[in-house]
Amino acid sequence: MLRAERLCAAWASALSTGAMEGSIHSVFDRAVNINTAGGMVSMLPAERGLYPWSCTVQTSAPLSALGLKPGMRAAISRAGMRVDEAGLAVDLSAARPVNLDIWQLDLTVPPAAECLAALEALLFAEGSAEGMRPLAVGGADNPFSAMIRPRLCALHTAFLSGEPQKAGEAAAAIAGCGPGLTPSSDDMLLGYVCAFYALACQAGQGREAALAIGRAACKAAAAKTNAISGAFLLQCGEGLASQNILDLFYALFSGSPGELAEAPARRILSIGAASGADILTGVVLSLQTLQTHGTR
């Protein structure tokens, strides 16, 4: 039996109201994704940062070696998860719930200019240039960033004006572009919306008003991309972010020296071939534009 160490608090709360039935969607060395009626949930190895609607388990073997196959049925409760066809049981009973809601962070001050400059420099020096990076820190466009560049203005305008319908239309026009299991433009949107929420939270702006804009953008984008990327976007729309993104925001918005943001930024950059760079690109774009002009 595997034992889960940490569990997203939103998932733990949902399980406290009743069990879930699901089926295995996809299996990778470092992630197992499961479709349920309430959305996609994930099992990750312990060394990965916790993601929304995920749990982390301690295992020396890659998750792809557990005998799981797409389509296998999964039964999930707060006590544990069973996939009988694979003979797999995961104990969730002692897993520590972790709050991944951006709005629970104590974000005291907006990021200083030197912190943003350091983040831009790190992204330019070490982020993959195959995705959306040129949109935030310059350099030659690739075919994907060149396609998205003229569509960014509508996204910025919608978020600055606080118009959910226009935010949805702009996000839908951007979604699904680029290489990777989660397309580059989707990862950028995720980072962009997360940083928008962080800015709104720090400024003391209304949670529901901000969520209306972010939800509209993420819901529209999710409808234009694949199931895994769409699930991540929908979770983001509800104000949830990975532990690494929360750590980055805490460092950026706490008045701490800029170098404290480097470690979580590097952990984000390490995600996938380009996904981390694209997420960080979205964060930087949001801070460059929305912090400068103000969010509504």
Image (spheres, rainbow, N blue to C red):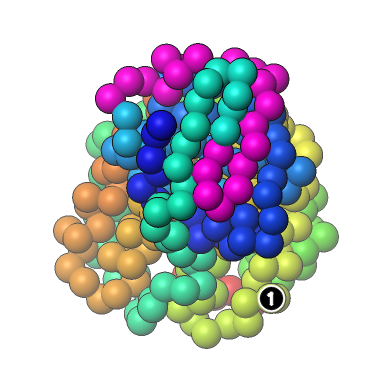
Depth check, front residue: 141 or 98? 98
Residue at left offset 51%, top offset 60%: 9
Amino acid type, residue under disc 1 in the picture: Glu
Residue at point 56% right, 24% down? Answer: 181
The magenta stretch spans residue 68: yes
Magenta-highlighted residues: 60-81
Rendered position, 44 above or below 261:
above
In the displayed image of the protein, which residue is found farthest to the right? 165
Looking at this view, is 139 or 224 the one in front? 224
- Residue 3: percent from the left, percent from the top? 38, 40
- Pick the front one: 290 or 217: 217
In this rendering, the answer to whether 188 lies above or below 195 is above
Label 1: few (<14), some (14–19) or many (≥20) C-alpha neighbours in 10 Å: few
Question: Is 121 left, or right, of 163 in this rendering?
Answer: left
Q: Residue furthest bottom?
A: 204
| Rendered image quadrant of residue 82 | top right
| Residue 254 among those drawn in magenta | no
Image mark count: 1
Residue 53 locus on image (x, y percent): 55, 49
Residue 127 in view of the camera: no
**What element does badge 1 sit on?**
helix
| Residue wearing tag 1 | 208
